[in-house]
């Protein structure tokens, strides 16, 4: 089976190929000399480090979207807070691997916090007693500092995030990713091999311009064999806080996420309305669930989380049955 480094060019022949490092597509690749020497066939020790670290994490979920601006980071925060609120004895971690545009420190209200290194690794920043966050945003000098890195350095940072953060015992690890199918995604999928990744939640908005890119993200998941837990449609409609009348800010001219999910044989996990109060509370780093419990977004999240937990429970039961009969 061919293998491709996380930062490989588009037409990489694969590290197992006899032409590895020797064809025109390899020119300029940072792995060219390693592949040509045959050293690339040696398993990346980082993969085993990640497996060891995440062995204490029960559920690992990627949040993906092919399109920027669909509210993926906001959804990640809402999902983490919703899961944490269900049982305060269960710990939830949020890992922000958007290296160039980390949002979780702001959304979770921990801007300016710093992470500390100990003998057991990096200590994440705690938002509440059972919610921890790790982001490159904690490692920068300030919120306006740009991260200008090539693929290999991004790859190294993703590996460190996955293998060096001391989460302790976690029930859920929610991984917030950048838009697209970039180095960060390839690095994450490479290092998450064999760690019992539950799958990905795909976030979109109703309009076709977003759905076009989201379809590419779905194709990416199929190609790298990431299970898709379902699709979430964000900003489905604006609900007037006074008259409660819905207005479609982003018209679903092609059927929205519901139609796309049906076409792709995926589950529509939920549709979240647009509530300016939720956006404002995230900008201010507040907990929307506590600040605005009457928001239609909070009600929609309750149904979404219930559907997600039922799916995870069913998968766990199925895996347990397979183990019992083997």
Image: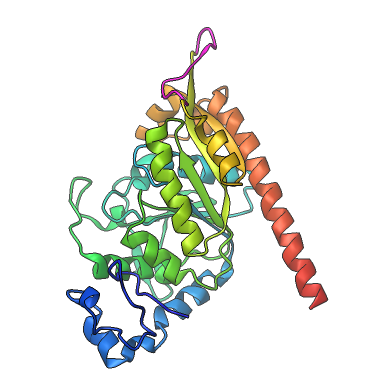
In the rendered view, tell whether residue 189 sits above or below residue 35.
above
| Residue 48 seen in this snapshot | yes
In the rendered view, tell whether residue 83 sits above or below residue 246.
below
Tell me where residue 123 sits by quadrant: bottom left
Q: Residue at x 45, y 46 (%)?
A: 215
Per the picture, the main secondary structure of the magenta-coloured stretch is loop
Q: Residue at x 29, y 85 (%)?
A: 35
Q: Farthest residue in the right direction?
A: 325
Q: Quadrant of the C terminus?
A: bottom right
Q: Is residue 174 magenta?
A: no
Residue 109 falls left or right of residue 33: right
Q: Is residue 246 magenta?
A: yes
Q: Residue at x 70, y 58 (%)?
A: 315
In the rendered view, tell whether residue 151 sits above or below residue 67.
below
Image coords of residue 310 (percent x, y): 71, 48
Image coords of residue 114 (percent x, y): 31, 56
Image coords of residue 217 (percent x, y): 43, 51
Colouring scheme, one of rainbow, by chain, secondary structure, one colour: rainbow
Number of marks: 0
In the rendered view, tell whether residue 148 sits above or below residue 284.
below
| Residue 73 seen in this snapshot | no
Nearest to the observer: residue 64 or residue 218 = 218
Q: Farthest residue in the top direction?
A: 243
Q: Residue at x 22, y 86 (%)?
A: 33
Residue numbers of the magenta segment: 241-252
Nearest to the observer: residue 33 or residue 198 = 33
Image coords of residue 267 (percent x, y): 62, 44
């Amino acid at each position: 089976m061919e293998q491709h480094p996380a930062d490989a060019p588009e037409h990489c022949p694969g590290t197992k190929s006899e032409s590895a490092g020797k064809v025109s597509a390899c020119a300029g690749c940072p792995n060219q000399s390693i592949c040509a020497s045959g050293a690339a066939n040696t398993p990346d020790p980082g993969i085993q480090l990640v497996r060891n670290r995440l062995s204490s994490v029960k559920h690992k979920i990627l949040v993906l979207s092919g399109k920027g601006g669909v509210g993926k980071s906001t959804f990640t925060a809402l999902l983490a807070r919703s899961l944490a609120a269900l049982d305060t004895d269960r710990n939830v971690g949020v890992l922000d691997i958007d290296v160039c545009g980390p949002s979780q420190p702001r959304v979770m209200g921990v801007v300016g916090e710093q992470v500390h290194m100990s003998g057991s690794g990096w200590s994440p920043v705690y938002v509440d007693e059972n919610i921890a966050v790790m982001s490159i945003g904690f490692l920068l000098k300030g919120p306006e500092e740009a991260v200008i890195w090539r693929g290999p350095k991004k790859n190294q940072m993703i590996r460190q995030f996955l293998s060096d953060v001391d989460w302790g015992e976690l029930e859920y690890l929610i991984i917030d990713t950048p838009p697209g199918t970039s180095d960060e995604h390839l690095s994450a999928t490479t290092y998450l091999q064999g760690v019992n990744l539950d799958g990905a939640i795909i976030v979109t908005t109703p309009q076709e311009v977003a759905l076009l890119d989201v379809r590419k993200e779905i194709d990416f998941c199929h190609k790298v064999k990431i299970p898709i837990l379902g699709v979430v449609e964000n900003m489905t409609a604006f609900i007037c806080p006074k008259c409660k009348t819905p207005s479609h800010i982003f018209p679903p001219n092609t059927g929205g996420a519901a139609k796309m999910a049906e076409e792709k044989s995926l589950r529509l996990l939920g549709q979240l309305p647009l509530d300016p109060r939720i956006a404002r509370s995230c900008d201010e780093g507040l907990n929307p669930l506590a600040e605005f419990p009457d928001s239609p977004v909070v009600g929609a999240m309750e149904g979404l989380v219930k559907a997600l937990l039922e799916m995870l429970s069913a998968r766990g039961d199925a895996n347990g049955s397979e183990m019992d009969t083997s």
